[in-house]
């Protein structure tokens, strides 16, 4: 198992100016904020199931940028069809990191489908992602980082994490402000 | 304007396509639909258009939000039965002030033979109103181009969520 906050911090350490990050609502948004606020983060506080397709529309519009969606197993499961949509587009600049604690952490830790047998990395491969893998220990972090930040996409990395409580780090939650800051930083 | 796709001479969807092109709409998300079929064919063969086929309509709301973040204009093509699939995702538009444009082929409102289409067909305008959309409706083929153009401008120049409803009378009731 990997520690989610540490893993996200290491993924985003020394981040390239060409990296745009879309975190899914809840813990993923807190993890990305804890790694350091950045105008290239489009924090989500809702739109459950939508993180991957927001990343897709952004990656289509910005083919020279790398788009990294960082989300949880529950958020991805709510929009599972979007993996088929992404696989069909085959964009090389889109990567998805799934912080998979096999539970709905925001609502009391109920088991998610990944605790009950669903293999998200296998689904991504079956949807024609170029690369997809599940990592279970920090020894595999260098490969995970290379996959998510370097390899041609679409890429999906499932990061098996423990369901431990970490302090909440709450970024801006006014969506108008988040959108406006993101667009100004990206487009001027 | 040249296009690789030839619309039939009386196909008013040609005017929708032309209006989208004039207004620099680049991204298209769609769920397959008979009423939009020729427009879908036209955007697919247009090398300037980025076309994404969706598994469900709520993906299109998120897709076009992402397109806007990246500086591109988009449109989602769907049928009235798909509008209900989007309801929670419409919150994203309101919460962040995203522009959004959808063109909807209507079922369940004119000589409909399938009772299963009626609840969502009748509920479509109310659903959009609840979600804070501006609504346009096209009944006359001559309005297809001008209404689309006005809708794109309201969506992207005035940053509003906008829906254009193509009436079932315009499209022609489905026959079996």
Image (cartoon, helix red, strand yellow):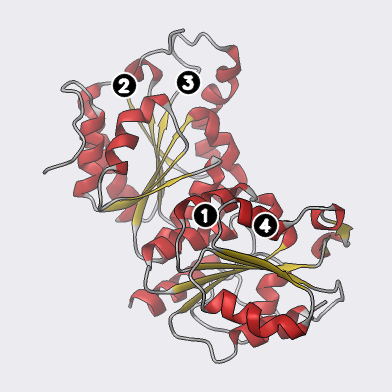
Query: Dot 4 falls on which chain?
Result: A
* B170 displayed left or right of A121: left
- As drawn, B103 above or below A39: above
Q: Are marks 1 and 3 on the same chain?
A: no
Mark 3 secondary-structure assignment: loop
Q: Are marks 1 and 4 on the same chain?
A: yes
The local crowd at label 3, few if under 14, some if 14 to 19, many if 20 or more residues have their Cα within 10 Å, is: many
- As drawn, B82 above or below B87: above
Mark 2 secondary-structure assignment: loop
Query: Dot 2 falls on which chain?
Result: B
Residue assigned mark 1:
A86
Do the CB atoms of the residues marked 4 and 3 lie less than 8 Å apart? no
The nearer-to-camera label among 1 and 3 is 1
Q: Earlier in the sequence, mark 1 or mark 4?
A: 4
Residue assigned mark 3:
B107
Residue assigned mark 2:
B139
Do the CB atoms of the residues marked 2 and 1 lie less than 8 Å apart? no
Q: Are marks 2 and 1 on the same chain?
A: no
Do the CB atoms of the residues marked 1 and 3 lie less than 8 Å apart? no
């Amino acid at each position: 198992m990997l520690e989610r906050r540490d893993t996200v911090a290491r993924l985003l350490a020394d981040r390239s100016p060409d990296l745009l990050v879309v975190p899914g609502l809840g813990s993923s948004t807190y993890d990305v904020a804890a790694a350091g606020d950045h105008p290239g983060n489009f924090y989500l506080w809702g739109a459950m199931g939508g993180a991957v397709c927001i990343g897709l529309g952004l990656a289509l519009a910005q083919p020279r940028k790398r788009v990294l969606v960082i989300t949880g197993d529950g958020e991805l499961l709510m929009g599972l069809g979007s993996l088929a949509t992404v696989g069909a587009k085959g964009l090389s600049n889109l990567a998805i990191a799934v912080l998979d604690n096999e539970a709905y952490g925001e609502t009391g830790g109920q088991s998610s489908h990944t605790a009950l047998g669903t293999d998200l990395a296998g689904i991504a491969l079956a949807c024609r992602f170029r690369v997809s893998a599940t990592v279970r220990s920090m020894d595999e972090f260098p490969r995970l980082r290379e996959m998510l930040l370097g390899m041609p996409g679409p890429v999906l990395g499932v990061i098996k994490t423990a369901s431990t409580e970490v302090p909440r780090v709450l970024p801006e939650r006014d969506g108008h402000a988040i959108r406006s800051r993101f667009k100004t930083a990206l487009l001027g | 304007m040249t296009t690789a796709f030839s619309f039939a001479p009386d196909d008013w969807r040609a005017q929708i396509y032309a209006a989208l092109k004039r207004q620099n709409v680049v991204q298209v998300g769609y769920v397959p639909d008979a009423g939009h079929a020729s427009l879908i064919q036209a955007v697919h063969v247009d090398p300037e258009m980025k076309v994404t086929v969706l598994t469900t309509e709520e993906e299109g709301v998120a897709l076009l939000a992402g397109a806007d973040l990246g500086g591109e204009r988009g449109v989602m093509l769907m049928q009235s039965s798909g509008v209900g699939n989007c309801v929670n995702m419409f919150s994203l538009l309101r919460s962040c002030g995203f522009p959004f444009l959808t063109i909807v082929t209507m079922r369940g409102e004119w000589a409909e033979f399938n009772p299963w289409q009626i609840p969502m067909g009748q509920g479509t305008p109310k659903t959009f109103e609840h979600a804070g959309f501006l609504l346009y409706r096209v009944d006359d083929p001559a309005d297809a181009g001008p209404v689309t153009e006005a809708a794109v401008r309201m969506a992207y120049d005035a940053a509003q969520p906008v829906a254009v409803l193509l009436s079932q009378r315009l499209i022609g009731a489905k026959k079996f």
